Image (tube, grey):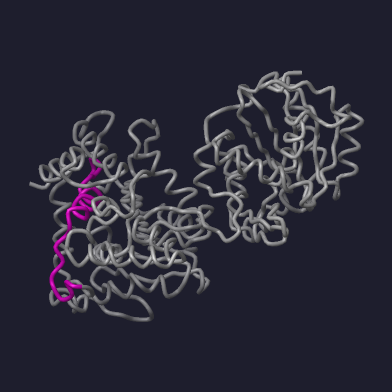
Amino acid sequence: MLREWLIEYSQDVLNGNIVACQKHKWACQRFLRDIEREGTEDFPYLFDEEKAYKFLNWMTLFKHTKGVLEGQHIQPAPIQIFIFGNIYGWVKPNGFRRFKKVYWQVAKKNGKSQSLSCVGSFEASAFGEANAQVYCAATKTDQAKIVWDEIWKQIEGCDALKDKFRVRYGKIEHPKSGSFIKALSKEDGKRGDGVHTQCGIVDELHLHETSEMLDNLASSMAARQQPLLIAITTAGFNLSHPAYRVEYKYVSELLDPNNPKENETYFAMVNELDPNDKIEDPTVWEKANPILCSYPEGIEFIKEELNLALQVPDKMRGFLTKNMNVWIDSKPDGYLPLNKWKECEEEFTLEDMRGLPCIVGVDLSAKIDLTSLSFLFIKNGFLYVHNHSFMPEDTLEQKRKSDKVDYWLWKEQGYITMTPGSVVDYEFLEAYIEKIENEYELKILEVCSDPWNASQFMQNLDKKGYLTVEIRQGIQTLGPATKDFRERVFSKKVIHNGNPVLTWSIGNAVTRKDANENFMLDKSKSTERIDPIASVINANVRTVVLEQGGQPDLNDHILSDDWSL
């Protein structure tokens, strides 16, 4: 009985009989919890073994198309039985599928393309719905064709099915049900617009610079009764991409039993190393490689990859992401690893800073671009960061496309204010500073800004009684503050509230050094916006000065641990 098998598997994972990472364990806890409340008023879903078996048996029709098992019939591995047993087994009271969206993150050579291919042909055979449109989506044409090609290879090698499908006009067609499978790629200008998707398949989500493809596929499923959007990926090394910034972060919270976040129609599985695991320890490799580590040749492959990475440091990044499934931030000349920044995230609001002194940093940038303010507070020896950005409303759509981020979502979340017209109206910045100061009774010691394009803005603040300070944009001025802020982050002396706009800008920031190894942010080399973090550094220039005792014109600032005046 599949139900009993899944329960026993989950228990073996939780008691350590099966090597698994923390998120894998959480996924098993989630399943056991779902079984306990099955069919209740709060959880009306039912586990249908017959539907789950139908897909798992479908997998066995096909043969391995590569590797040491090439030519042999697929026998689903335990991790595949657990994942797809959940996806296809859980149904609503009306019999329709419970899970509409799936995220599986696992190291390479663990059956990703094989699994996706079985899903594609299954959904195109009217087991989901008749007239199904199945799309294999990727950023590059070659990537989109990987799963498409694998589907066709599996079908060609299956005597029972090869006469039931055909290839025509770039589609794998199933004439009996009127369904088809097609590759989509942004490179070909095909983004999923205008389609009527039953099943969307996204391989290697970490390569997507934006969530556009995923979002378009999701929106195209609205009329389907039981659609399925499935993304499988390894980890990557650009933490500003949506695979990490959005999906990985979300599923980590979704799986965490201590997090109240719930989404009963989203299935997630993550197979990765845990934070304290050592890559040289073979006993932890199975956490990221549940299939590859099930046979000797797979273990030997990982061992060879590790030895190569240890001997050639340039290959270590690839080993960590592809073989150990660990997200890393390794942008050349990157300013700050986002995993270190993440460690400083903590829930706080401006209410927690009520009545405290602060420094305000401003980066005005060009009026048609993103403009940012940052409020820095010192409290109990920690530097607290509150950031807010502004953008002209008329350029929103243009900037969303050129910068490849969803400014509209950030606006809805309250991290960006849209100003009327096609340029940023600096009066909105002035009003925001005054509003925050008055609402939370803050003591704004200084407002600091790059002097470029800021004369009128600073004069207006001067007239309102603020002490304004020009921050020259040379390495002599910015270098110490840039280094200081990074050191605070590394020592976990910075606290921020997870503002995604600020986090994105940090991921974009690169540095340049002088002959003495001093460094500053380099706007000319940063291909994406860094205005939010630039505003933080502008403020931190004066934070460093004030903490060191001030300059002659600032001797009236008497500082304690809280910058008390």
Work out which quarter of the rendered image holds the C terminus and state it: top right
- Residue lying at 79% horizontally and 32% vertically, measured from the top left: 431
Left or right: residue 380 versus residue 172 is: right
Residue 270 image point, x, y percent: 33, 49
Residue 278 lies within the magenta run: no
Q: Is residue 281 above or below residue 179?
A: above
The image quarter in which residue 398 lies = bottom right
In the rendered structure, the answer to whether residue 224 lies left or right of residue 395 reads left
Judged left or right of residue 160, residue 365 is: right
- Name the outermost residue toward the bottom: 168
Which span is picked out in magenta? 68-94
The residue drawn where x is 67% and y is 51% is 530
Along the viewing direction, whichever of 517 and 254 lies nearer the viewer: 517
Whether 95 is drawn above or below 280: the answer is: above
At x 67%, y 21%, the residue is: 562
* 83 drawn magenta: yes
In the shown orientation, is residue 483 left or right of residue 90?
Answer: right
Query: Which of the 4 image quarters holds residue 118?
Result: bottom left
Count every numbered label the image shows and give the total.
0
The answer to whether residue 18 is above or below residue 191 is above
Q: Residue sitting at 20 percent across and 34 percent down?
A: 38
The residue lying toward the viewer, choosing from 32 and 339, is 339
Image-quadrant location for residue 276: top left
x, y (%) of residue 557? Answer: 80, 23
Residue 215 in the image, given as x and y percentages of width and height: 48, 55
Q: Furthest-left residue in view? A: 1
